[in-house]
Image (tube, rainbow, N blue to C red):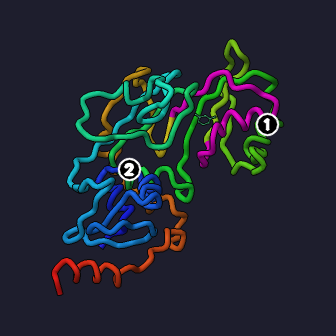
Amino acid sequence: MIRLQKYLANAGVASRRAAEKMIAEGRVSVNDEIIREMGVQIDEDYDVVKVDGEAVKNTEKKYYIMLNKPVGFVTTVSDDKGRPTVMDLVSDISARIYPVGRLDYDTEGLLLLTNDGDLTFKITHPKHDIAKTYVAEVTGNITMDTILQLRRGVMVDGVKTSPAEVEVVGATQYGTKVEITIHEGRNRQVRKMFEALGCIVKKLKRTKEAGLTLGHLPSGKWRKLSESEVNMLKKIEAAGTKGKNSSKPKVKAYSKTNSKRRTQKSGK
Ligand code: URA
């Protein structure tokens, strides 16, 4: 038995969160019964799952890709304004891969793409505390006090950011180059953290995520992750949950309805 949203994610239909949205929108059926509730368990061997009326097959090969995203590309599979998307940079992959999390249009650097919904969920879920490192080129006066405030946390959209690792790593034509590692993924978080302290980020590049390093991958180019990199990512759950199984999403028992569905199916 497997939770419906996990099944959809494993099948590469969407990330687990996006799959939950599809379920809530009534786009998913199990044995031709539309399911809108979360936590429904299905039996992969018996139940027929359809999205928008089309049967889902859970046999897709998994792909894990690192892209060095340039500025000027939207992190999405398709853009309704017709702007170039990160998908325009990745070719020769015969599966429906999608970006893991996002980088702003004006941010460059390490972006993962995959069709492994389970892994996407692990990397993007806040409970896993995934470290993301950025190099920011900022204007304004970067004092020790600024660094200390960034480390401790600053107010962004009314909520204090969690502790960050922050170091000055050089000087640029704009001012100062700062390396900052955060463990959250709020919208435009790094830019807003600096803005909160009166500094403007002129250039932002993600250099590391979840233990992976961008290295010398040229801008606009991508590569498949190595087996050891993929294995490292798959271990995230054990390393990143702070030892709390209790923080795992609660699974709602649905066996009664499931058995009803199967009973109906077998005609008993
Ligand atoms: N923080 C930002 O401000 N932008 C990004 O793209 C990522 C993190």
Answer yes or no: is residue 222 visible.
Answer: yes
Relative to 18, 201 lies left or right: right
Disc number placed over residue 14 in the picture, else none: 2
**Residue 218: x, y in percent?**
41, 20
The answer to which of 247 and 93 lies nearer the viewer is 93
Name which residue type carries label 1: Ala
**Residue 30: x, y in percent?**
30, 67
What range of the chain is rendered magenta?
182-207
Q: Quadrant of residue 34?
A: bottom left
Circle 2 sits in a helix, a strand or a loop, which is it?
Answer: loop
Could you tell me which quadrant the N terminus lies in? bottom left
Disc number placed over residue 196 in the picture, else none: 1
Circle 1 sits in a helix, a strand or a loop, which is it?
Answer: loop
Query: 10 Å neighbourhood of mark 1: few (<14), some, or many (≥20)?
Result: some
- The residue most toward the bottom is 268
Which residue is rendered at x = 42% and y = 39% of the image?
99
Q: Is residue 189 magenta?
A: yes
**Residue 122: x, y in percent?**
45, 55
For marks 1 and 2 on the same chain, the one whose residue lies earlier in the sequence: 2
The answer to which of 204 and 21 lies nearer the viewer is 21
Relative to 143, 129 lies left or right: left
Could you tell me which quadrant the C terminus lies in? bottom left
